[in-house]
Image: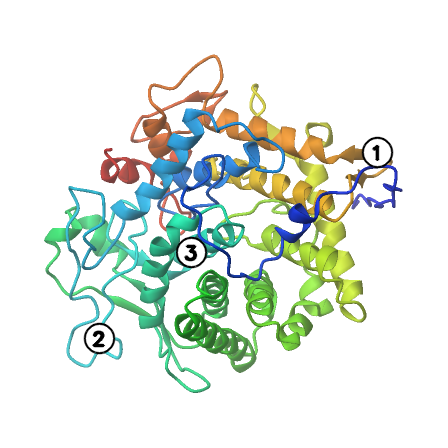
Amino acid sequence: MRREVELQEVDWTAFPKPSEEMQSSWLLQHSPKPKKKTVRKHTCAWTLAFIGIGVVMAFSMTIRALTHRHHYQQQAPDAYNMALHTGLKFFNSQRSGRLPDENNITWRGDSCLQDGKYPGSSHPNLSGGYYDGGDAIKSNFKMSFAMTMLSWSQQLGELSHVEGIIKWGTDYFLKTFDSSAADSIHDMVSQVGSEGTERYCWMRPEDIDYERHLHVCISECPNLAAEMAAALASASIVFTENDAYSQKLIHGAKILYRFAESCIKGSGRSSRSSWDELLWGGVWLYYATGDATYLDRVTTLALADPSDSFSRDSGVFSWNTKLAGAQLLLTRMRLFLSPGYPAEEVLRKFHNQISIVMCSYLPSFNKFNRTKGGLIQLNNGDPQPLQYAANAAFLAALYGDYLEASDTRGWSCGPNVYFTNVLRDFSRSQVSLSLHLTKKQSKTLAMSLDMGSVTQNMYTTEALRYQRTGKRAAREGGNGEKAQRKTQM
């Protein structure tokens, strides 16, 4: 029987209000401000999320949870700075195409410059983008999630130095469909490279000289189209000061979202298989454009009803499951924008859902297993790459910040009230365990980032233990063994 959790209203008027600076810092819309000469060291990189990166991207995204500027003024520990640096450097090692002079991976060179260039190709220029893992496949789905997460973190003022990483991805996305179309498109490239070919013959991408297979989607990829729409829409906020490029990204995002909706209507299929991406893409388009029609789309009961807070995957946020992230963005909308009727009913539903997710992260609720040291295991018996714990840690820290910025000092889990410091403590513990900052140290942090998995809080670095590092198959994501091979830093 489904357990019903009733969220209770609590009177927080006795607690001090957050500063105006803190409240204004959560406005996602970019506003011009003087550039600072230094970059704050106590910041975080958001999920570095396309699936081949696995563990690397998870650590980097959560440093902010430990060192939020409004709560912790000291410099971040060296291990966290190293995690951030290593995670971001990984993107440079995964770049495809003609590399810029500033690419700081000396053993990488230009590669796969001929992607898409064959007689009769409808997409003749597909150089660029990022490789998915240790092979040379370029997957738009996983890459899109990574770019969205980086864009979100940059909008929060935490990653001002990653605009080049984001633009490398979005420039590539614009090549994979007719981004100059006035209104609609008929197909899009979903992937470059074949799993059979790329995994049959291992070689450096720089040495690839054969014609690579293009996977072109015509009507069966509403989830991918909505995911890419989220990536372009979120990036458009990053590049607001470059108005022409920002508008180009918004135009592309609108086309892709329309294509996603047409795929569902044209095929007669239910939107349930793509509803989390439709939510994810639609809410980012609303934040990017302010167009109320996108608010109407994401606050329909048709999209809210499938979001079961007690399902197996509830609270699991990853490249393949966007619901928790979308719930948090929609909750942020309710807390700070207060759109009112008729959206309020559905936004309250999403707010209640993300509150229940936060309850499920607490040890006392026992929804998810944990290691003896306390690392949450969110993938329900499937391979347990550390990215899931890191993603949960970040969401929890951000939810706590949202509550505080809205003058709400806690939330209810059934009859119990928890203060926001509980969320921050959870985030701190998960990131510390993920980075192995416990009594039993890993050999090096860089190796842990590339290969780390946790079994009773002990890292294993055996290349063939691919289920623990997330290397299972392309559809499962992860490629820790191959990622380590490519990331000898």
Point 66% across, 70% down: residue: 295
- Marks 3/1 in contact by CB < 8 Å: the verdict is no
User: Three-letter amino acid code at disc 1?
Assistant: Asn
Crowd band around label 2 with a 10 angstrom C-alpha radius: few (<14), some (14–19), many (20+)? some
Point 48% across, 21% down: residue: 457
447 or 289, nearer to the observer: 289
Q: Is residue 231 above or below residue 87?
A: below
138 or 475, nearer to the observer: 138
User: Three-letter amino acid code at disc 3?
Assistant: Met
CA distance separating discs 3 and 2 = 23 Å
Residue under numbered circle 3: 147
Q: Is residue 145 left or right of residue 348?
A: left
The percent position of residue 113, horizontal first and vertical second, equals 16, 63
User: Three-letter amino acid code at disc 2?
Assistant: Pro
Q: Earlier in the sequence, mark 3 or mark 2?
A: 2
> What's the colour scheme?
rainbow
423 or 482, nearer to the observer: 423
Q: Earlier in the sequence, mark 3 or mark 1?
A: 3
Task: Give the number of the disc on residue 416.
Answer: 1
Q: Earlier in the sequence, mark 2 or mark 1?
A: 2
Task: Specify whether residue 380 is in view.
Answer: no
Residue under numbered circle 2: 124
Quadrant assignment for the N terminus? top right
Point 56% across, 74% down: residue: 269
Task: Give the number of the disc on residue 171.
Answer: none
